[in-house]
Amino acid sequence: MIKSVYQKFFKNFNVTIKFSALLSVILIIIYLFLALILTYMPTIFSDFLGLILLLLILYLLVSYLSPYFYSFFANNMALETKDSSQVNIMSFIGTRRIGKRRGIKNIQQLFKWLLFSYLIYVVLELVIVVLIITIGQFVDNSEIQMFLKEFNSVNTMLGNEAYYEQISQILFKYEDLINLIAGISNFIAVSFAFYFFLYKFARSFINYYAMQGDGSFPIASFFLNKSIKRTLAIKEFDYNKKFFLIMWPYYLSCFVIFSITYLLMFFFLDTSVILNALTAMIVTVFLLLPFIPVVLDFNMLMAEKFRYYYLKVSSEDLTKFVGEEVVHHKFASKEEEEKFKKEFEIFNKKVQDMLNEGKVDVDKESKNNNLEGDEASKENKKTDEKENKNQNIDKKDDDKEDK
């Protein structure tokens, strides 16, 4: 599996690297624009309204970029067809129009995962700050303990004209401590949120394969998302295990690149924690973008098995849903009810025929895998027998020498 994925990847690399380069240029332009804002308005995202503004900006970015990911998927798939000579940077840009269609644009659910990541970031940063301060206040003579004592003593002056002046002096005095706590909490929180989003993003490319077929697949998001989730959880499909084997080097690379970039900026540059996080994320994405085809090629190889299991699961979901609706639905006439049941029987028959065809392919693949496993076992057995035979010969020779 891994060998086949990388064979496809290297075969098409001279084309797909151009797609990655275009996305990189777009991301660099967006980064420079945001970095300019953060440089001259470093506190723009520091309050509640700033957090809402940040979420809005991220939503607009995801909305703009998601059609490019569909285009990446479609053109990478076309590279394996007879029309591969037509795939180039212009076809990549042109296919983006299809990716902008409503049903396709939201199929990866990127905004949903962005929102989850954002909540992880906000909640985790708050928890880490509270945890650091709570632990620090119980450590004797710690800087955190001294800061809290001075801060609490000033609180007794609340309402006094000197209150804000005293607070400003304390914040200036412990500026390095505050920056350190903010940097640590932001680094950990952004890291977890960023890794979570990348994990969901990489897995979301399989969603495009739910659209393949002749229309018998349920496209409505209610069925789509539920059925895909159930399909990927099927043990015999074995998607999760193979996905991990393919992706773990990239998640490790992501951790190393993000951490080094963020920490270097934090300790050696006088920049805001938000700019540090933004830069670290952009650098990481910039270096990993050329490897998007690895995820696409992996999903392409899994697509036939996915098609069978997804159709099986989604048809079960749809049959159950329709059955529940029919029980509560009042038909205008007996003829209408009979017509509906007849059409649904035709649909089920069509789905069953597709399942039977798909099962042949899945069984064939499983048989090939078993044959490969048996051959490997035979080879291992022969090797063990040969080694045992050599050991017995060596032992006999040793016995002769002893005599």
Image: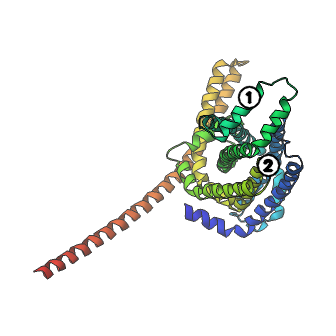
Residue at x-position 17% and y-position 77%: 396
Q: Is residue 403 left or right of residue 77?
A: left
Closer to the eye: label 2 or 1: 1
Residue matched to label 1: 153
Q: Is residue 347 above or below residue 278?
A: above
**Is any atom of residue 351 visible in this view?**
no
- What percent of the width, then of the height, locates residue 278? 77, 51
Q: Is residue 50 visible?
A: yes
Q: Which residue bears the numbered disc 2?
A: 272
> How many numbered discs?
2
Tell me if 51 is positioned left or right of 116 in this view.
Answer: right
- Between residue 3 and residue 402, name the one nearer to us: 402
| Quadrant the N terminus occupies | bottom right
Tag 2 secondary structure: loop
Q: Could you tell me the amino acid type at mark 1? A: Ser
Q: Nearer the viewer, residue 260 or 29?
A: 260
Marks 2/1: CA–CA distance: 29 Å
Q: Mark 2 is on which residue type?
A: Ser
Which numbered dot is residue 99? none
Q: How is the image coloured?
A: rainbow
Q: Residues within 10 Å of mark 2 (few under 14, many from 20)?
A: some
- Location of the C terminus by quadrant is bottom left
**Residue 222, placed above or below residue 202:** above
Secondary structure of residue under mark 1: helix
Q: Quadrant of residue 138?
A: top right
Choose between 34 and 9: the one closer to the eye: 34
Percent across and percent down for residue 401 are 15, 82
Q: Earlier in the sequence, mark 2 or mark 1?
A: 1
Residue 367 % position (x, y): 46, 56
- Residue at the far bottom in the pictured view: 401
Residue 93: image location, x then y, percent: 83, 58
Q: Badge 1: how crowded within 10 Å, few (<14), some, or many (20+)?
A: few
